[in-house]
Amino acid sequence: MARLRIEALSKSFGGTDAVREVSLDIADGEFLVLLGPSGCGKSTLLRMIAGLEDPTSGRILLDGRDITTEPPQRRDLAMVFQSYALYPHLTVAKNIGFPLRARRHSRAAIAERVERVAATLELSPLLDRRPAALSGGQRQRVALARAMVRDPGAFLMDEPLSNLDAKLRSATRAELIGLHRRLGATFLYVTHDQVEAMTMATRIALLNAGAVEQVGTPEELYDRPRSTFVAGFLGSPPMNLFPAVVHSRDGGLRVRADGVDAALPIADRVDDQPVIAGIRPEQLRLDPDGGAVRGRVTMVENLGSEELVHVEVGATTLCARAPRPAGARVGEPIGFRVDPAHVHLFDPDSGLRLTWRAPSDTAAPEPDAARAVPVP
Ligand SMILES: Nc1ncnc2c1ncn2[C@@H]1O[C@H](COP(=O)(O)OP(=O)(O)OP(=O)(O)O)[C@@H](O)[C@H]1O
Ligand SMILES: [Mg+2]
């Protein structure tokens, strides 16, 4: 059992605020991914939780117990690093058993436990080898086994897959998902790789410059990004974002920009409100009669099963993603239709998502009863 609670945790290095007032509640058995660009404070946050770095302020609670100043070995947490940090002169079995030997368990108890963990991770045939004679993926599993051998309440992992090649990374990803399911332990996992985050996380905490930008399920972050930062971080290629204006026409709202005139699923009246509009590449549906977005093809990228079509629309370039062959030719005009439910709007100043407050007492939205308000 391991429920982690982080309260307004901050860390400054001299003048750098690496982590700024981060608060998170991580339920027992969760797979929480700390995601964000390089330098946003992911490792610093994880190292504070592990006890390898002293917080400047804030608290860390494990199952309700304040562990902010406890030494790492008393925290019931196991850390797995990007560099596996295996002992080169020890066999796989000795590497895995190391934490138990350090705690003076009996030789028989260690052997039994090492064998059990090695079997779980399919390392049994490799127990007598030294790390130099293992592949990257096997070394990674030994590092994991060494973390598992103590049966900790929670695993803290800092980019454990980043040294693996693409194929092995995806295999180990699947292995970690299975392992989490089997162990039922709490996983706190750092990565800057959005594919890892989307596929493994039960929840993602997206960090931006040391602060939490949004916490939610992968679907919540992808479908309802709280800000342009989240919208631009998740998705490959990311959401198209461009300046536009929202205005009323025929009892509904439309979003308009040079080359763009798309309906919004909102009945309201608004006088030319400036916004940042967002449309995901897969939501630009190629349509010869499509009037919502019109432009000229500048480039077509072949991804194998799909194509990325880059389109000059007014002053901006948008990217559409479609099954190959999409039938787009460079230099030619092209049109798309857009499902109104998949147009995102953001405040141009704060970058926060705009949402229309539904009128509280009527089923159908009424004109003038709602206003665009940034939702924090
Ligand atoms: N020991 C340190 N002394 C001074 N500054 C540090 C120290 N450790 C980290 N920093 C700074 O704190 C900020 C956050 O660093 P951190 O390593 O936590 O980022 P990260 O999100 O893990 O990045 P990456 O994805 O590149 O690993 C960075 O600006 C970094 O330069
Ligand atoms: Mg890091």
Image (spheres, helix red, strand yellow):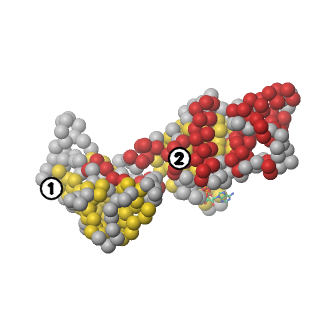
Which picture quadrant has residue 17? Answer: bottom right
Residue 147 in the image, given as x and y percentages of width and height: 72, 38
Residue 92 visible? The answer is: yes
Residue 372 visible? The answer is: no
Residue 334 in the image, given as x and y percentages of width and height: 27, 65
- Mark identifier at residue 306: none
> What residue sits 22% from the left and 53% below the top?
263
Element carrying mark 2:
helix
Badge 2 amino acid:
Ala
Q: Considering depth in this image, is 165 or 247 the residue closer to the camera? A: 165
Query: Is 32 placed left or right of 335 in the picture?
Result: right
The quarter in which the N terminus is drawn is top right
Q: Considering depth in this image, is 22 or 58 the residue closer to the camera? A: 22
> What residue sits 18% from the left and 36% below the top?
362
Locate ligand 1 by image quadrant: bottom right
Which picture quadrant has residue 255? Answer: bottom left
Residue 30 in the image, given as x and y percentages of width and height: 55, 35
Residue 9 in the image, given as x and y percentages of width and height: 58, 46
> What residue sits 51% from the left and 44% below the top?
199
- Mark identifier at residue 197: 2
> What residue sits 46% from the left and 59% below the top?
303
Circle 1: is it few (<14), some (14-19), or many (20+) Cα within 10 Å? few
Badge 1 amino acid:
Arg
- Residue matched to label 1: 249
Q: Is residue 107 above or below residue 324?
A: above
Nearer the observer: mark 2 or 1; the answer is 2
In three-dimensional space, the C-alpha distance between marks 2 and 1, rounded to whole angstroms, equals 40 Å
Q: Earlier in the sequence, mark 2 or mark 1?
A: 2
